[in-house]
Amino acid sequence: MVDDLISTICPYCGVGCGINLKVNELGQLKSVEPQSNHPISQGKLCDKGWSTAYAVTNKNRLTQPLKRIKNEFFPISWDEALSTIAVELNQILDDSGPKSIGIISSARATNEDNYAAQKFTRTVLKSNNIDHCARICHSPTVAGLKQSLGSGAMTNSASEIFDTDLIMVFGADPTENHSILGGHIMQAHLKGCELVVVDPRKTRLAKLANIHLQLNLGSNIALVNAMLHVIIKEKWYDENFINERCNGFKYLAQHVAQLTPVSVEAITGLKAVDIYQAAKHYSQAKRAMIFYGMGITQYMSGTNNVISLANLALICGHIGKNGTGVNPLRGQNNVQGACDMGCLPNVYPGYQSVIDTNIQTKFSNAWQCDLDPLEGLTSMGMTKAALAGDLHALILFGEDPVVTDPDQNHVKASLKKLDLFVVAELSMTETAKLADIILPAASFAEKDGTFTNCERRVQLVNQALEPLGVAMGDWQWLQALAKKMGSDQLNWKTSEDVFNEMTSLNPSYEAMTYQKLAKNHGLQWPCNNENPTGTRLLHANTFPIGKARLISVNHTDIDEPTDDEYPLSLTTNRLHFHYGCGSMTRNSPLLERETPPGILFINPENANTLNIAHLDAIGVKSRRGYIETRAIITGDVPIGLVSMPYHFKEAPSNQLTNTAQDPVTKMPELKACAVSVIPLPKGVEPKSIQQLLEGD
Amino acid sequence: MMLNHIPDSIEIIDYKDDGKDTRHYRFRLLSKTHHSHWHETQAGQFFMLNVPEVGEAPFTFTEPPNEQNEFSALIRKMASVTSALFDLSKGQIVGARGPFGQGWPHTILKDEYILIVAGGCGLAPLVHLINTLIATTENKKIVLIYGARDEQSQMLIAQQKRWLKTITIYHTLDQVSEDSNFNDGFNLLKGTPLDVLPQALSSFNSLPSKVLLCGPEVMMNSIAQTSIGRGIPETSIYLSLERRMHCAVGLCGHCYLGDQYVCKQGPTFSWQQLQSFRSTA
Amino acid sequence: MNIYLLDDIKKLQLHLTYQYQLHQIVKNNQGQSHWQQISTDQFPTLLHEKAQTSIKDFFFAQQENILVFNGEYFQETLPSPNPFVLFGVQSCDLVAVNYQDKFFKNDPYYQARRKHCLLVGLDCISPCEHGFCPTVNAGPGVRSHTADLILHPLVNQPLEKPQWLLIEGSEKGAMAIKHMTIKGQPLETAHWHYLTQRDLTLKACKQKFSDDSHINIAIEKINNNNVSAVFWQKVAIQCIGCSGCTSLCPTCSCYGTRSIKLPNDNISQERFWDSCLYEGFQKEASFHNPTAEAGKRVERFWRHKFSDGIATEFDRYGCVGCGRCEQTCPGVIGVHSIMKRIANDA
């Protein structure tokens, strides 16, 4: 029986669906329902959204600060926790300077929390050592689209899915990871919109698509360059658009002149005729949209992959008009917001460069303090610095890098070297287990604030429940910590105060207020004095950099090809019923039931050769690690490719994945490495990574 | 009459291993507050075992509750509930609800010529029935085919040895190792129950008048179809199905089969019944 | 059973609050209709709009603990709600509760709540989005055996002077208003010709529903086994197993259970809504799964709503035509979408 129905935003992926929390007369959250009139989700939720009550009210929630003494955690008061942290941080600042402390904020926290985190780093700790997980999902998007177009976000709105003639889904699995958008794509396709899917796996959308290009791992650029070649050769490009809106066409044309479809058949594993057809359909469509995901970004060539997609859209003029554009599908509910808030080592809120002296002055005046003129460390830079003994303290919230980052042994070792490691979390994660102090975080249902979804829509999050135990919102404890450290830089009474300070410094958010967000079901940035009701479509008349840049990029091989010892390629994927490290979704008895804790998808032919039956226990080994899991035999992965979801702490794919990085963004090549698979004896249960490591 | 979803308390009195990861458990009912039909248990019916803090799962009785309120079950370690049970020691208290479902049609099995085919754990739901038939039937012929993956996964061997005095037993193994014992009275063959079916059928004067099946569904389907092909009527073939169950009283929906629920209309069905349900599945 | 004329519905609401906690459909600040307990005497206007979530969770709770184990004994923990009235329930939801009443006839938890509830039905006089209750014999007028009291808004009344028919649907309903007076007078009995007027209004409403012939064609195809396994497999690609349809469907009743530890260290068994569309729904501990194929699960769901076998058992189809699944299905296989595809393509 519902006592109250609180409208808020789903805490899972970047789609930002409207969800209502049903709070009973005892103030408990027992169930949820979709918002029937939400502009994006229109009365729908995915299985993750429907199970939100289990995530928020689970029995594993942390309810008070914990301090580690040796290998055990003991409850302490907030006052003791924050005093301890403050004393140690001040000591480290005195001894080793601002560069020796890092903050990793959370793409799951609100904009207000993220704004507070970067301000804390910049004004209290006095460095730019602030980052968040976009490093391992969409940093190449920001870097790539920024170079090509001048702005690194989805150029369209979700609603334009219904205003286009062709949708090309590139290295993304939206029905699983952004299910409601994936559903929109299915719906548009059923109504007649053409669907082209480029993916090494037979995804759900691939099964429905008009064209599925099942390319080899890591051959995106080779494919796109060949498509560009066809489009240019056949004169299917949009000459007016190129002349008026783009630079660099001549060079690009020269660059791809020899890159015929036939010439990339071997690299891509595709037939020239199929590449030709895809190029034809995409370029000839009246309106076409590209959606892409981590199958583009999580490569050493991630930034260049993004650039090549921009090239494709640009030469066809498929950008800047309703129903055309290039759209990164961002993973976490507020990864767009965390970036917008400047939780990046190189930019202040609104992507304003920290090394630009004018901008430094602007922020320095606003915050009334001196600022570090140099870029800070990325999250992986922090890991390295910790290992090298140069980083002494790390504060991390809402992230579980021990499970989600590549090469987790490396991550673990570096975290263990820290003098002070503070984690703010909802529940005890693998990462939190390594912390010196754990702070109990308030869940999204327990705070007010805003999330920015993948279509740049800033939406209000409304508090439905009292925080569990003494849990606190992130900006609130950051503010308390700043005070303990002797700083009154963070000084707000409400989330709205934080938001208002942020909008005064972030031009894209300039004209937003909580009242306007409430009235309009959120607003899409840029929302400023020229666009007071926000912007549905980016780049309609001009790009932020004036003319877009067509940048010639080359195919690069994946870092670790297969060989005799490691004969199978491993890629990663996600399951629609889990999210991230599973710390929320795995509390649902329904979602947890869907698979064993840890699975590997393998083609029937490979399974047969290896004498593996469906759901048999298997071992998977790469140059970096070994895990045990169970086999799911499916034709959805091609021969020679195995795929593993990364949600399971028992069998984390990141024990295996490669750390080779994109040179621009340091994005690790999570989507491709070489492994070997062996069946375990019949009747043997797969051991969890924890058991395997203890056994060592 | 309102249903009762609450287990009665039972005590683990004893257990002993039987094959790999399998144990005979002996329980004693400590209360009969919530369920009053314990002493009317029929062969082939089941109970829900509740391991507090872990969950519930269905198991069949190998021996129904006796006057001392003791009953037995053969339990194989599979997942969370059984693993947790295996970690408990004698004297500890767990819960049980039951008996549930339709058992074997024992009243029409007296004085019949019966072929029984069981695979793996599928022998457990037949133990009580075979014991009853041996004890109560006068003019009988019973032939049992028991298939298992390998020697380690065979179960109830001691029990079967006692049956050997009265009934013929064929053993099949998917994998036969060199030291497999061919000389303890069982007719051992490498293969599956389907492979010895012709031989077993021809050991009856004409045809068996009843065929009872329990084991993997693929095995039961193939045996049933072959038997029908040999002229055994669909109404004379009975089988027991396994399904995921939560409530055991036809409410939770998990064990659906067409428009029916295995916990209520089953778990034993005649082949004919099953075909009509499957057609609505 | 008696019928009365009512000028001021607030009088009825007020009267019922003497005996019952009042629940009614209201809109939240985002314009969403939902059931809410009304605690003041500022009674909201009666909304002619179904709530997105049906009333089934008033009886079949979304999550509830059914027992307590103290280490020695297991004890039943039945809910004991105060008497409550659901005021203004549409016919589709009432028919569904009637269906659930049969299904959960012997379930102590369902019945413990149900027996404390008074249902006040509200006739729909215009079709709702996605609704097709007339096609499945579940509306738009309230079926007399499904509500304790029925309200019918009389048409042709001036806006500022609305008038209602109040129809007794059960003994319990009659008892609830037995002592009701307005300005010291007993309720005004209505002439039977008002019932004729009601019939005409409902008939006119039925006419306004859009063409739902695809539903009937598809029902026939499903029951004649004219829908192939290949068809189900194909549409099931679109099922992402979100559980939206089963959560919103007023006749879905599947549940799972798990053992949980209570704050006082006692153990309980929790039961919670489940969905037959999940891959794990029938998966056994051995991993054997009779419905591992999505096609089989999707087929099962729709058979459960439209099979003649179910109809025989419950005197009606499992579907009550509320259309909620059409709105909530991200995979575009809600009731209209799928029945159209069955009618046209299967």
Image: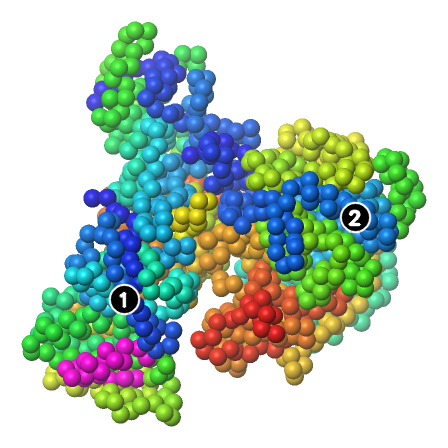
Marker disc for residue B26: 1
**Residue type at mark 2?**
Leu
Instruction: Decide if residue A396 is on the left or right side of residue C287.
Output: right
SS for tag 1? strand
Q: What residue lies at 58% left-to-right and 61% top-to-bottom?
A: A649
Colouring scheme applied when the structure was drawn: rainbow
Residue B74, image x, y percentages = 30, 69
Instruction: Decide if residue C21 is on the left or right side of residue A290.
Output: left
Q: Mark 2 Cα within 10 Å, few/some/many (few <14, many 20+)?
A: many
Q: What residue lies at 24% left-to-right and 53% top-to-bottom?
A: B31
Q: Looking at this view, is A442 or A276 the one in front?
A: A442
Q: Looking at this view, is A511 or A195 the one in front?
A: A511
Q: Quadrant of the N terminus of chain C?
A: top left
Q: Quadrant of residue A70?
A: bottom right
Q: What residue span does the magenta drawing correspond to? A: B154-172
Residue C20, image x, y percentages = 34, 24
Q: Mark 1 Cα within 10 Å, few/some/many (few <14, many 20+)?
A: many
Q: Could you tell me how far apart the alpha carbons at marks 1 and 2 are, in whole angstroms? A: 61 Å
Q: Quadrant of residue B81?
A: bottom left
Q: Is residue B157 magenta?
A: yes
Residue A2, image x, y percentages = 45, 33
Q: Quadrant of the C terminus of chain C?
A: bottom left
Q: Looking at this view, is C214 or A118 the one in front?
A: A118
**Residue type at mark 1?**
Arg
Q: Is residue A500 magenta?
A: no
Q: What residue lies at 46% left-to-right and 58% top-to-bottom?
A: A593
Q: What residue lies at 43% left-to-right and 59% top-to-bottom?
A: C280
**Relative to residue A144, is residue A564 depicted above or below?**
below
Marker disc for residue A89: 2
Residue that sits furthest to the top in the current view: C184
Q: Chain of mark 2?
A: A
**Relative to residue C278, is residue A644 depicted above or below?**
below
